[in-house]
Amino acid sequence: MALSKQERRQRIKYRIRKKIFGTTERPRLCVFRSNKNIFVQLIDDVKQVTVCATSSRVKDIAEQKVNKTEQAALVGKAIAAKATAAGISNVVFDRNGYLYHGRIKSLAEAAREGGLIF
């Protein structure tokens, strides 16, 4: 029997998370993509805390009339700015089971342009 879309993504997610681990010096940049919005967190897996987070629901980003791919790029720039303000420059990218194209790719490239290294 074929796997559902959610089960397939969950298996990919587990496979990725076996290899990726965020530390205090190099937190994990975790992405969640819903149908309407995109959410990003910097997570320290050692202390099990979220260092900083942002999403497309933040007022500055939500007010702009752009498509979802451009919105993801704005979120990438915003998380890069928050991370540099918190003194973080190196991160580990966790695509969370999503394919690296479209909104995920746009967010990652914008975060790299914003100064994050991964």
Image (spheres, rainbow, N blue to C red):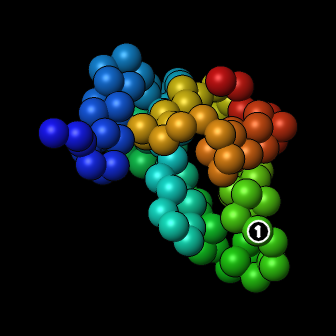
Estimate how packed mark 1 is, as few (under 14), some (14 to 19) or many (20 or more) residues with alpha carbons within 10 Å.
Answer: few
Q: What kind of element bears circle 1? A: loop
Residue 52 seen: no
> Which amino acid, mark 1?
Asn
Above or below residue 13? Residue 60 is below
Above or below residue 11? Residue 72 is below
Judge left or right: residue 31 versus residue 63.
left
Identify the residue at horizontal 24%, vertical 42% (top origin).
Answer: 3
- In the displayed orientation, state which residue is furthest to the front: 1
Quadrant occupied by the N terminus: top left
- In the displayed orientation, state which residue is furthest to the left: 1
Residue marked by disc 1: 67
Q: Position of residue 4 (x, y in %)?
A: 27, 49
Above or below residue 103? Residue 93 is above
Q: Position of residue 74 (x, y in %)?
A: 76, 58
Residue 112, quarter of the rendered image: top right
Judge left or right: residue 100 versus residue 16.
right
Judge left or right: residue 7 versus residue 9.
left
Identify the residue at horizontal 60%, vertical 35% (top origin).
Answer: 100
Residue 12, quarter of the rendered image: top left
Q: Position of residue 70 (x, y in %)?
A: 79, 59
Identify the residue at horizontal 56%, vertical 71% (top origin).
Answer: 36
Residue 105 seen: yes
Above or below residue 44? Residue 34 is below
Quadrant occupied by the C terminus: top right
Q: Position of residue 54 (x, y in %)?
A: 58, 60
Of residues 57 and 27, the one nearer the viewer is: 57
Of residues 39 and 69, the one nearer the viewer is: 69
